[in-house]
Amino acid sequence: MRTTVAPVTEGPAQETGGCAGVASPSFETVIGLEVHVELATVSKMFCRCSARFGGEPNAQVCPVCAALPGALPVPNRRAVEYAIKIGLALHCRIGDRTRFDRKNYFYPDLPKAYQISQFDRPLAQDGYLQVGGKRVRIRRVHMEEDAGKLLHAEAGGGSMVDLNRAGVPLVEIVTEPDLSSPEEARLFLQQLRTVLAYLDVSDLRLEEGSMRCDANLSLRPAGHSALGIRSEVKNLNSFRAVERALGFEEKRQERILAGGGRVVQETRHWNDPEGKTLSLRSKEEANDYRYFPEPDLLPLVVPPEWVEKVRAELPESPDERLARLRDEDGLSAYAAEFIVAAPEMAGFYDRCRTVYPHPKTIANWLMGEVSRLLNAGSGALTQGSVEPDGLAELLTLVDRGVLNGATAKTVLEEMFHSGERAAAIVTRKGLGQISDEDKLEAAVGEVLSANPRAVADYRGGKTGALGFLVGQVMKLTKGRGNPETVNRLLRGKLEGGD
Ligand code: ADP
Ligand code: MG
Ligand code: ZN
């Protein structure tokens, strides 16, 4: 963002400047993000306890994650592999000799009083994520373990700790301060989530905390390269919250700087209902984590062959998919982007595409009826009430003339609700399209004799009357008439003259 700030004469600065022509400083916004992603491994980072979310409190705990004396950690190979995947998808260099460090701090949800993390030798470094036309540099991707969770009882009941989450593998992704507006920060996160979703390494649920973000923002005079003093915002539970909180910080800092003040380097807490940030702690009170190499673990050697194996197995990236859907399947840019933005939909599309050869038809149904039903709360594509081959079967019934477009929509809705196959619904409800000429001819005859006016219009040259008559026949057949046959029969009668 570039904002012009009015010169301050007296009192606090105004939020926006309106004094055209007056020389005034303008600021640019600088944002860097730290994103935590919980890895969806079966077991925890350094022990064999289940890493599943939401179990009965403290049912997924052992001596290692409860930090009993003498218990030793053993790294989870799958977690390291997932972290390598993330590093590669973000175009990072993977360190072959990386190691774990202890990050020391005291908090009741951290039984060891230190977190195993990575300090100066992260697993992956120096990557980027393409967001629209911009390359946002990724400084590092490192592995660590999650802490437990405090549960606060009702007033007077004290607090309890649940260690099920203690030791769940996490990856932290840190960007360079390359983002220039709150909106860009949100777009970055959305793109990051899409890229990660295709890797299938995390649930990526902001509400459940499997994806979390801290946002750093500073302002500097436009054109300067030195960074300004930043604040860091925590407690951001949605992409929207990130954008709003950063918008608030931008204005707050601008007001301070325009008033000749100095921004204090501090951590701030986003209060979503009130729409503002509040100071949590300043840098002077900041923790000194006293990082040192974790003595219970050897340096982690990631052989290049392992990295290359993971690289070879990486799924298609969202950008590659976009190109494929556009260039090979012939979809419009809009349709391709719509499908690729939702990995479940893209997976559904691909599977449907293998059994049904008309990509544009699939795309139209996904963007139209399927999305409408999903938005109306008819479950998720991954819940399996409608499978890709089920949609393919429905579309084939339309192609074969068994169903017309309108009835097919009704059938699809029924498929979502009951999980039944299209053909079964068509039979049970008698929804098959009427292509039987004798039946349609009877309906056509009925409509013609009931609408002498339209017949006369058509014969007098007003060919638009045909549409009306087709509509009447469709009404009479409850939408089940084969539109082409109805058209042909009507035309034949009208032009044949009887
Ligand atoms: P810390 O050690 O406090 O976590 P880092 O230097 O690791 O600080 O930076 C954390 C995040 O803050 C990174 O995403 C980085 O890009 C961002 N950042 C650092 N300094 C600034 C600044 N002055 N303005 C905006 N973002 C910044
Ligand atoms: Mg940090
Ligand atoms: Zn354990």
Image (cartoon, rainbow, N blue to C red):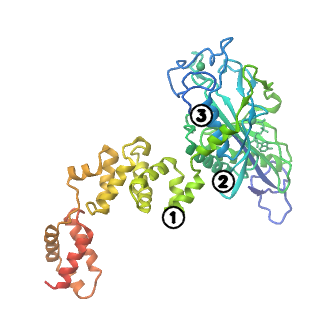
Q: Which residue is mark 2?
A: 131
Q: Is mark 1 within 8 Å of ligand 1?
A: no
Residue 140 position, x and y percent, is 73, 40
Q: Quadrant of residue 480?
A: bottom left
Which dot marks residue 332? 1
Q: Amino acid at mark 1?
A: Ser
The residue lying toward the viewer, choosing from 129 and 323, is 323
How dense is the environment of label 3, judged by Cα within 10 Å: few (below 14), some, or many (20 and up)?
many
Is 79 on the left or on the right of 391, as rendered? right
Kindly tell me whether residue 275 is visible in this rendering: no
Is 408 on the left or on the right of 314, as rendered? left
Look at the numbered discs 1 and 3 and tell me whether their residues touch, using CB distance below 8 Å.
no
Quadrant of the image for the C terminus? bottom left
Is 358 on the left or on the right of 19, as rendered? left
Q: Quadrant of residue 364?
A: bottom left
Farthest residue, direction front = 305
